[in-house]
Amino acid sequence: MEKIVPYKNNPKSKKEQIAEMFDNISPTYDKLNRLLSAGIDISWRKKALSFLKKNPPKNLLDIATGTADLAILAQKMLQPQKIVGIDISEGMLALGREKIQKLGLTEIITLQTADSENLPFAENSFEAITVSFGVRNFENLEKGLLEMYRVLKPQGKAIILEFSQPKIFPIKQLYNFYNKTFLPWLGKLISKDKSAYSYLPQSIEAFPEGKNFVQILEKIGFKNVICKPLSFGICSIYVGEK
């Protein structure tokens, strides 16, 4: 996969740049997210978590948890005993902890700074793992997926929600205009970090979506892998079992 980074001509690694980028945009992240997606991202998360409703996990790991939106929704929908959310951006985690505290969920949801490609957990630790809009930010995609596989319990499920690229006219053309022109402009206006919202469409283009990503998951060892496109292919849910 082509290496796409948020800040060009920056000597820092992609991982360090991603952490810096999310620290920079964290104060406006939730507001901008709702605005840019018109709230549809909430329904995407609900559909992703619905794949775990048949056999709800007792413990769940949410990777690239950000401000803990998915972790909080997972607690509401699945009622697990324990959720651990990890992220490399302390700025995002700080906002997530505030949300969790306000909701009185500190006994159930724990957030910690950790690297998705070096998870600080033993093998076979979690019954389910979720990642929403985070795998394309991995510096080494396969290494991150291998770590997910390692800490997932046998028969456990990994649920990955990630942006993809619409293929049908005129959705494809509208989406490209929105992503490459409108998104960086609005991102700069609200978050003061145009690079972050220019990085987003570039990272989506570089990501091996659909069948390509399914093949990577199967190569890692995941079984019964499926890909379910949502909203004309704007994003996709990937489900794999260990």
Image (cartoon, grey):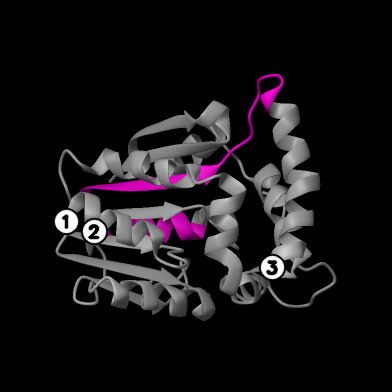
**In the drawing, does residue 141 fall left or right of residue 45?**
right
Q: Residue 191 carries which label?
A: 3
Amino acid type, callout 3: Ser
Q: In this view, does 239 lie above or below 131?
A: above
* Vertical order, 219 against 189 (above or below): above
Q: Position of residue 137 (x, y in %)?
A: 59, 59
Residue shown at the point (52%, 62%) measured from the top left: 30
Q: Which quadrant of the figure has residue 110? A: bottom left
Amino acid type for the residue under numbered disc 1: Gln
Confirm or deny contact between disc 2 and disc 1 (CB under 8 A). Answer: yes
Give, as a single range, the part of the protein colored magenta: 143-171
Residue 120 occupies quadrant: bottom left
Give the mark nearest the N terminus, 2 or 3.
Answer: 2
Q: Mark 1 points at which residue?
A: 79
Most foreground residue, 6 or 214: 6
Q: Can residue 22 be seen in this view?
A: no
User: Nearest the camera: 102 or 15?
Assistant: 102
**Cα–Cα span, label 2 and label 3:** 29 Å
Residue drawn at x 71%, y 58% is: 197
Query: Tag 1, which secondary structure?
Result: loop
Q: Is residue 100 above or below residue 75?
A: below
Residue 169: % across, % down: 70, 19
Q: Which mark is residue 116?
A: none
Residue occupied by mark 2: 75
Residue 176, percent from left and from top = 75, 36
Per the model, the C-alpha gap separating discs 1 and 3 is 34 Å
